[in-house]
Image (cartoon, helix red, strand yellow):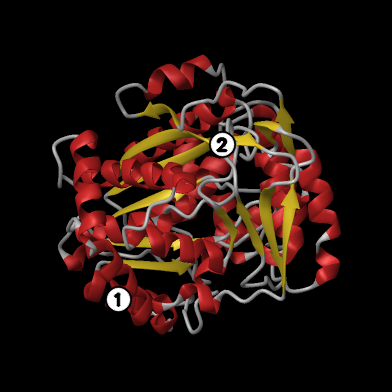
Amino acid sequence: MHAVDLIRKKRDGEPLTPEEIQFLVQGAATETIPEEQLSAWLMAALLRGLSLAEVDALTTAMKLSGEVFDPSPLGRFAVDKHSTGGVGDKTSFLIAPIAAAAGLVVPMISGRALGHTGGTLDKLESIPGYRTHLTLPEMMEVLALCSASIVGQTNRLVPADRVLYSLRDRTATVESPYLICASIMSKKLAAGLNGLVLDVKTGSGAFLRRKEDALFLAALMVETGERAGTSTAALLTNMNQPLGRFAGNWIEIRESLDLLAGKRHPLNEDLRELSLVLAGWMIFLGGAADSATAGRERAEQLLDSGRALEIFTKMVQAQGGDTAIFAEPERFHRPAIRKDFLADRSGYLARVDCTQVGWAVQRLGAGRERAGEPVAAHAGLEMHAKLGDKVGAGKPLCTLFADDPSRLAEPELLLRQALVIADRPAPIDPLIQEIITPENKKQYLEAAHHP
């Protein structure tokens, strides 16, 4: 086979065989196909689209391009959750220990902050000593000990994705739902999952703002997971404002610890509810409840019992983290700068450009613009109002945290544009907007009019 022939074939709208896709993926993993040819094929795939069979073949080839984790020796249902990314999205820290407490095993391979969205690994690394880079045997040891492990992708797990993802980022081919699906699902399926729950964000803070695009991607991932023999469901969820109260790194861990310890606050009820619903679906897929509703009820029982907090603490200890700071999390949070961002008028918080809020958090030092850049553990912000809340002139809308006073000016400008106060509250979209399952995925795939 020759890469140029496969570029031409896809350019002309013809489908590729599984063998042809395998050739391209292996060439990416081994770096035997030049970047310019892989880039040309990615652009052709973006413009022409891929069939469901091609997405399946691409996902499978990428999954098998390196090591594959096998949790089956543990003898329990392996399940995970994936979020397409948002602001203040810290559900993993609640979901993983809840599902583990229900008797499932959770090998969670997560990512870092890039762009306006936060990174699960960066948040965990704000815990002194926490190791996100484990070998697969080390991850197996942690899972055997506490049934949950949150780690980063190893160098030998899905190596083709690292090459193709980097090229997509540099060639304006990120937006293809087919390439997004293959990238996400290959990494999740390489973890040897029996079940997967997808949290697909839509709204002002989501990567896919249009609901139609998010629905199509969700259905595509459910289809791909089911074809691979992994029980899969997706929830379309609202990202029109930060999830919970805090957005940053350590402060999101602290907020999660509060909820795990049973400390509730009106401004993070959305985070608690979404975590319970997602965990409920994981428990249901794993056969530990008769329905997703019953799964949510069991998730709440496990959260309220303190069992999930025990498992989270045990997981952090097993991966080298210093859990002594959990006893007094407020004392550990010591940013150099704290500054209230005040409302310039009275009214109701009517609209939030959540992407702009995410960029404000990033500019405070909690995120990165380029892979490899350091992040500040204590940077971020605390929201003091949710959409629809009444606010008073001169009262704090949020509090900013940073390690350098020079980092405040741009976030304040972004927030002034992002947080809109009006005379009347605007309608608020529901937290969970759609649920996509194997039974209804076809209608969403057909409605999108994609190949």
- Mark 1 is on which residue type? Lys
Q: What secondary structure is found at the residue carrying circle 2?
A: helix
Under circle 1, the secondary element is helix
Closer to the camera in the image, 383 or 239: 383
In the picture, measured across the screen, residue 156 lies left or right of residue 169, that is left
Residue 178 numbered mark, or none: 2
Instruction: Examine the rendered structure and indicate whether residue 178 appears above or below residue 27.
Output: above
- Count neighbours of disc 2 (C-alpha within 10 A) and say few if under 14, some if 14 to 19, many if 20 or more: many
**In the image, residue 195 lies at what x, y percent?**
29, 47
Vertical order, 79 against 390 (above or below): below
Q: Amino acid at mark 2?
A: Tyr
User: Closer to the camera, 424 or 94?
Assistant: 424
Q: Residues within 10 Å of mark 1 (few under 14, many from 20)?
A: some
Q: Which mark is residue 314?
A: 1
Q: Are marks 2 and 1 in contact (CB under 8 Å)?
A: no
Compared across the picture, whether 416 is left or right of 439 comes to right
In the depicted structure, whether residue 136 falls above or below residue 292: below
Foreground of the two, 100 or 58: 100
Q: Is residue 47 visible?
A: yes
